[in-house]
Amino acid sequence: MGVSTFQSLQADFSTSALRSYTQSQFCWSDYRSETNTAIYETSFGGVRLGAVGVFRHAGRGTFYGYRRLDHIRADHIDDYLLSLPLQGSVTLSQLGAEVQAEPGELLITAMEHPLTAVVHGAAGNGSFDGFHVIVSGSLLRAQTPYIDECCRRPIDVASGSGKIMTTLFMLAIQESADMSESESRRLDHMLVDSVANALSGARESLRLAHSRQGRLLDRALHFVNSNLSDPGLNPHKIAAHCNVSVSYLHRAFASESLKLGSVLRETRLQRARESLRNPELRHQSIS
């Protein structure tokens, strides 16, 4: 079973060529790219073993992938997409939530819903590299019934069972060309098991993080409601009050499918509506 690869080093690179490749090997989707160089470099290749498809995507610049309703209707797949950056980062937007993964972190999304993926090159050289893995939804749910709890949350896979999973992704691409059909089937089962084991180890961490983030959200929202009259109220001031970084605060809100900017804006609008209904509150500023 061989590894199929798409590669372009052309200045006039057309995403239609990559689209044709991925529709036959990966999934139905559309793409666009941005680069500061005259030549766009990208490679996307991997292997389908059965229940699992392992692909590696590398290049420079910023790469955008879109999976829309027409794509979902076209391929009818009930799979999960696992994105694991090795260099650079990946941002996924789905069902109103936007989350980002850095190297050593895994993002999982259900491919039955529209999504947008953005691969960012690393600071400095602008290079990106990482795995995009498709796993059968029915098999993964059978081993990991709580899989949807893990979706759209960065999961640390830098060590333990997560590191073993990453190693198997690498071996699937490097060694599958020399494997017999029976060996490929065994590797396919091993990959599903490795993903389930990595998620099992991450589940308790997710629950603890969810609890910590819940307390953080309560504190942040209380601060917002108590300081709406402050014209300088912004994410930086809220994060400083909560003793966390701005990026961590955004991720805490994203874990509940919320955007901090939207929450701040909607809270101010709600206070404005209350002020209009209650003359005693009209003297209060919400700007």
Image (cartoon, grey):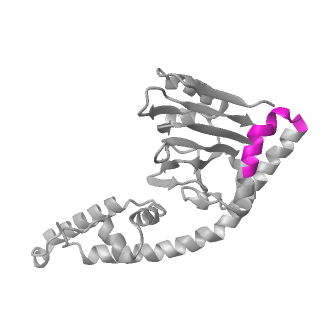
Query: Which residue appears at 28% of the width and 75% of the height?
Result: 225
> Considering the image in quadrants, where does the C terminus appear?
bottom left
Q: Is residue 94 above or below residue 65?
A: below
**Secondary structure of the magenta portion, mostly?**
helix
Q: Is residue 170 above or below residue 107?
A: above
Query: Which residue appears at 88% of the width and 35% of the height?
Result: 181
Q: Is residue 178 within the magenta segment?
A: yes
Answer left or right for 247 relative to 111: left
> Considering the image in quadrants, where does the N terminus appear?
top right
Tell me residue 282's x, y (percent).
11, 73
Q: Is residue 94 within the magenta segment?
A: no
Q: Is residue 245 above or below residue 162?
A: below
Specify whether residue 67 is in view: no
Specify whether residue 242 is in view: yes
Quadrant assignment, res 161: bottom right
Viewer-side residue, 242 vs 148: 242
Tell me residue 152's x, y (percent).
54, 55
Answer left or right for 120 relative to 4: left
Q: Which residues are magenta?
A: 167-182
Viewer-side residue, 48 vs 56: 56
Query: Which residue appears at 49% of the width and 28% of the height?
Result: 40
Tell me residue 230's x, y (percent).
20, 72
Viewer-side residue, 111 vs 178: 178
Q: What is the residue that sits farthest to the front in this orientation?
A: 124
Query: Which residue appears at 48% of the width and 26% of the height?
Result: 39
Tell me residue 201's x, y (percent).
70, 66
Viewer-side residue, 65 vs 272: 65
